[in-house]
Amino acid sequence: MDTYISMANSSDPYPPEERYNKVTRGCLRILKDNDVRLLILTKSDLVMRDVDILKDMKVAVSITITTIDDEKAKIMEPNAPAPSKRLEALRVLSKNDIPCIVRIDPIIPGFNDSELEDIVDKISPFADHVVASTLKPRADSMKRLKGIIDLENFEFSRLEGAFYLPKDLRFSLLERVENACKRYSISFATCREGYRFKAKSCDGGHLIPS
């Protein structure tokens, strides 16, 4: 099995401080020099800065786009770069032949579910793969979400420490994303949903050059 490093699943490798401390940029140089295969997961457009390094690496970049509405994004992701900036990052990465993945995550009924087809349409010129996930809050994030969206209408079931939406609802939302991806011949997958997909990997790791 092909192996690679994922940067980073639990925290974003491009926090605001990276603009001046350049720790991630330094790590990329080390990984490049050692010919390491890499998957970058981020919500930041700052990844564009490192195209000069990334274009010569065995790398794929996964950018999360929860909504394409900049004002709506300020509510859900107040400290993250605007979706318009992330779309520009996708454009730049794609132009430099760096494989691009888009994470539509999380899909929240009543918040961004009306945008699913529009998101796929916007990212279609640049994305090679789409990963979609529905809302799966844990107890601590459930409390934070209550101040942003109305959770009273949702029936959650608890599984492995997270709260899942009903299966029929989850699958109907994921199917919409899958069908939109098919229209543009973009591969599609889900993670931790139990939803069948045909892509070679969930996270898009199969796009990293060997």
Image (cartoon, rainbow, N blue to C red):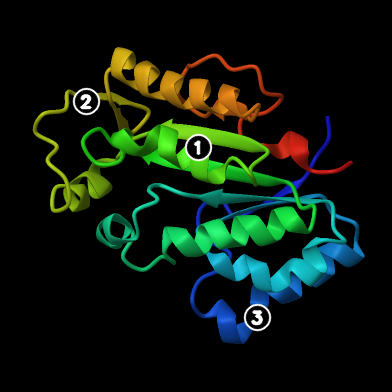
Q: Which image quarter: residue 156?
A: top left
- Residue 200, compared with residue 83, is above or below; it is above
69 displayed left or right of 14:
left
- Residue 39, compared with residue 200, is above or below; it is below
Q: Which residue is mark 2?
A: 156
Amino acid, disc 3: Lys
Going from N to C along the chain, the mark reached first, 2 or 1, is 1
Gap in Å between the C-alphas at discs 3 and 1?
Answer: 32 Å
Regarding mark 3 in the picture, which secondary structure is present there? loop
151 displayed left or right of 100:
left
- Residue 210, compared with residue 20, is above or below; it is above
Gap in Å between the C-alphas at discs 3 and 2?
Answer: 41 Å
Disc 3 crowd, CA 10 A, few/some/many (<14, 14-19, 20+) = few
Residue 198: give x, y in percent of width and height. 65, 17
Q: Which residue is mark 1?
A: 120
Amino acid, disc 2: Phe
The quadrant of the image that shows the N terminus is top right
- The residue at 59%/22% (across/down) is 182
Going from N to C along the chain, the mark reached first, 3 or 1, is 3
Tell me if label 2 and label 1 are in contact, CB under 8 Å.
no
Going from N to C along the chain, the mark reached first, 3 or 2, is 3
Q: Which image quarter: residue 123?
A: top right
Residue 14: give x, y in percent of width and height. 56, 68
Q: Which residue is mark 3?
A: 22
- The residue at 41%/64% (across/down) is 82
Disc 2 crowd, CA 10 A, few/some/many (<14, 14-19, 20+) = some
Q: Which image quarter: residue 28?
A: bottom right
Task: Name the disc covering residue 145, or none.
Answer: none
Residue 43: give x, y in percent of width and height. 50, 58
